[in-house]
Structures are given as structure tokens and as C-alpha cells.
Image: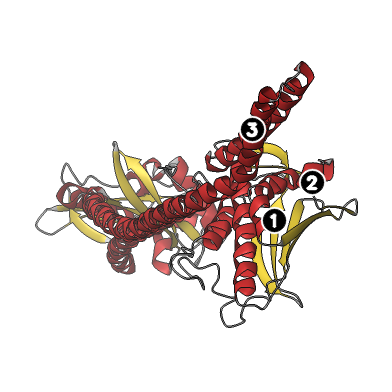
Amino acid sequence: MNKFAKTNKDLTLLNFYILIAVIVWLLATSASLFWNIYNKQQSTHALAIKEARSHFNKDKTFRLWVASHGGVYVPLDERTPPNPYLSHLPERDITKESGEELTLMNAAYVYRQMISDNSELFKIKGHISSLKPLNPINKPSEWERKALLAFERGEKEVTDFVDIDGKSFLTLMSPMITQEACLKCHAFQGYKVDDILGGVGVSVPMDGYLSIQRKLITIMIWTHLGIFLMGLTGILFVSGRFKKHLLERKESEQMLIQQSKLASMGEMLSNIAHQWRQPLSGLNLIIQDIKDAYLYKELTDDYLNKSVEQANELTRYMSRTIDDFRDFFKPSKEKETFDIKMITGKALSMYTALFNIHNISYKLTCNRHNKSFTDISEVVSCEDMIISSYRTEVLQVMVNLISNARDVIRQKQDDGLLDKGYIHIGFFSTDNHIIVKVQDNGGGIPYDIINKIFEPYFTTKFKSQGTGIGLYMSKLIIEKNIGGEIRAENNDIGALFIVKIPKLLQTIGTERYLG
């Protein structure tokens, strides 16, 4: 039994489409995952900024309130000593009637103490900075200096992730605009109302935000992995159904091929019987002549040698016939280089005895050289008709077409509609293809079935005369194995089969239908 290769063109394409579907699905789920992660990161950033703005606005309101009152007096203690940078103010320090000493805290002084408490209680940090700091503690860091320069250029807000004491913080900084109340402390520095006095930064710890973000991203990853696996399962399930269908189809086609072989074998055995009938009769006559010559004392060396040579020629002919039929049943494992005229001549040689019996003539025409042959022994090879393909399978197609033409002609003869049958096979060469046209004079194919003749099991013969798979197998071989084309049409005298075969066999897939 012939074996199919593990894969074929259809399965190769299906595997390719499966791979593309898996890649597309992977890209889609990955894109969704990355998009959701990006959105979550942006959302975390936005929430942190919102919190920072909330703290900034609260602090700003408080600073403006203190500044609007010219500062606040508080009792002197170790934590709140007199502000040395307000020493130019005559009433920086005052004493109550009770004798308690008070010192003036301006908005910046109050803010620093408040933000220190806020940092200890809520981990929220803040800092006032200026390019011309009155207090060295307000000297800007490198990041703050860049932000202050950006304010000079018109920026209204600067945010960034910064590391403070080894931890991640979102820092938001906005310009501090000089108010009328600010001039009490800063007028001597040359500031005027609406000048940029400096900047106020608020730093919100990101640990809590990032912890929640990591948990949500982990959930996203597992969710998308689950979605991807479900989609992958669906793709593999659907593709598995398609593969099962293809394999069932191939198994069915394999059965058709086996049936075709068995049908061809029966026909070939019948042809061998017809091919051998005449040489066997000739051998019988030679043996009888030798016996008669011996009885009548006429058996000379010359006579005997001549008779033996005649017998040898007949046996060589019979041996060639066996070789031809053996080649027909031997599968093509590798492509070969051969003349398509010669292989068609070999196909015709299997029918010459039957053609003589049934009054059917044939002709082969090489249209490249405008030369015709009516005797297969005279057919010669030429470079224009050389192809590289599967020799046995091309032979099987030619046998199927010749057998089909013979059957149609015999049917017409049996019905009394045709006396002499005729089969003409023409060969045409193009740059990349050989075109073979098989013409018979059997009257043509009925138009209501001409589109069905290449379907499996379709036949117009009695069941005992045909299986209906010869033309189907021919189409399978030509179009799927060899990458050519085959079609049928009618003309004035009968049916015309046109076969287009590539001169150089291209790889169609890893599976071939071995005929």
C-alpha cells in the first residue's frame, strides 16, 4: 500500500495559519496587557499628583493666611528660637505684660515647622527653595534648581519621581509668587509684587501607591494569561477539527488511489494478455517450423540461428512489455528528467494490440518541430519536450487519458455510431511548461456532465467497466503533485483533454499522492 507523507500542502498551510493566529492572539493579549499596565501606571501617577496638589493647596492656603497677618507670635522655646533672618524687623521679639517672651514666625518659618511635623506623622515632605535664599536651609537641590529655572521660563508646575533617603517620592513643585505681605521680609532683597520669590515643593511617598499598583498589575498579568490560554485552547480546538477533517479526507483519497491501482492492474493484465498473444503465436510458429525442418532434414545451422534470433526478438519484445507494465506500477519516489513524448509513447505501447483489434489509430505530433509519428517505435526524443517531474505519475495520467479515449471510442463503435477510432496527442512547448493535448473522435462529453468528470466515482460506464476515479486521480496528480493544470473541452470531432505540466517540478508540499 502506498504511504502518504506526514504533511501536505493543506496541512502546511493550516499549520501556518494556526501559527499566525497564535502570534496575532499573543500580540493582541500582550498589547492589551501592556496598555492596561500603562494606564494603571498613569492612573497611579495621576492619583499621586492629585494628592500632592491637595497637600500643596492646603499648605499654600495656610502660608498665605500667616503672611496676610504679617506672621504670628509664638512663645520662645528650644524648637522655636528667634528667626535670625528677621533681625531687621524692630518688633521681631516682644514681651507680654506677664513677662512671657514671644518671637515672630513668618510664613516660611511656620511652614518649615509644620512640614516637619507632617513628615513625622504622615511621611509627607515639603521644602521651600529659592535661587536667592534668605535662609541657607532654603538653598535648592539640583532638581529644585532646574524647576526654579523652569518657572523663570514660564512653567507653572513641575513633577517628577525622586529618591529621598532611598525611597521613591512623587515631588510636585510650583512657583511661590511674591505677595504684598511677603515684602515685609523680602523687600530688602529687591523683590516686588508678582515676582517669583521661589518655589514650594511637596513630596508624596509612593510606597503605598506602588504596592497597590504591583498587586493590580499581577492580577492583570494572570488575567491576561488566562485569556490568552483560553483563546489558545479555542484556536487549537478549531484547528484540530480542521486537521481531523483533512486527515480523514486524505485517508479517503488514499483509498481512492488504492482502488485506482487495483482497477488499473486489472486493465493492465488484460493488456498484457493482448500484447503477448501475437508474439506467443509467433513463438509457437517458430517452434513448429524448427520441428518440421528437423523432420524433413532441412534444419541447417543458418536456419536454426535465424529461428533462434527471431525467437529472441519476440522474447525481448515480451520482456520490454513486462518492463513497461512494471514501470507503470512502480511509484515515483524522486523526480526524474525525461521526454514527455517518450513516456506517452510508452503509455500507448500498452494499448497497441488492443488498438489493432478494435480498429483504432493514433498519432503523436511534436508541434515544436512540426513532426508526427504513427508508430511508437519511431518516436525520438528532443530537448524541447524534456521535463523534470515524477515519471511514473505522468505515465499514469497519460495511461488514464488514453484509456478513457479508447473506452469512449469503443462505446461509439459498439453503438454503431463510429467505424474507425482515432486518437491524436499533440505536444506544445512554452518557456516554462509543456502542454499535452489528447484528442479523440468519440463525439465529445455531454455538456451536462462535463463539469463533473473530474469528480471521484463519477462515471458514465457500467460499474463493471469503470470505477470513476481515473480522471479524478489524473487531476489529483497533475494539480496537487506536479503543480500543473488539467481540463477538458469539446470540439467538432470529440473530447479534448489539455494537460499543462511545469518543465521544472516545484515543491508543492511535503505530501504527494502516489499513483
Which residue was labeled with disc 2?
385
Above or below — where is 338 with respect to 16?
Answer: above
Q: Residues within 10 Å of mark 3 (few under 14, many from 20)?
A: few
Which numbered disc covers residue 356?
Answer: 1
- Secondary structure beneath dot 1 equals helix
Left/right placement of residue 483 relative to residue 239 reads right
Residue at the right extreme, as displayed: 370
Q: Are marks 1 and 3 in contact (CB under 8 Å)?
A: no
Amino acid under disc 2: Met
- Secondary structure beneath dot 2 equals helix
Q: Earlier in the sequence, mark 2 or mark 3?
A: 3
Mark in front: 1 vs 3: 3
Residue at the bottom extreme, as displayed: 448
Q: Are marks 2 and 3 in contact (CB under 8 Å)?
A: no
Q: Earlier in the sequence, mark 1 or mark 2?
A: 1
| Label 1, label 3: how far apart the Cα atoms are | 26 Å
Left/right placement of residue 109 relative to residue 35 reads left
Q: Residue at the location (50% across, 67% down)?
A: 194
Number of numbered discs on residues: 3
Colour theme? secondary structure
Which residue was labeled with disc 3?
288
Mark in front: 1 vs 2: 1
Amino acid under disc 1: Asn
Closest to the observer: 283 or 157?
A: 283
- Secondary structure beneath dot 3 equals helix
Mark in front: 2 vs 3: 3
Amino acid under disc 3: Gln
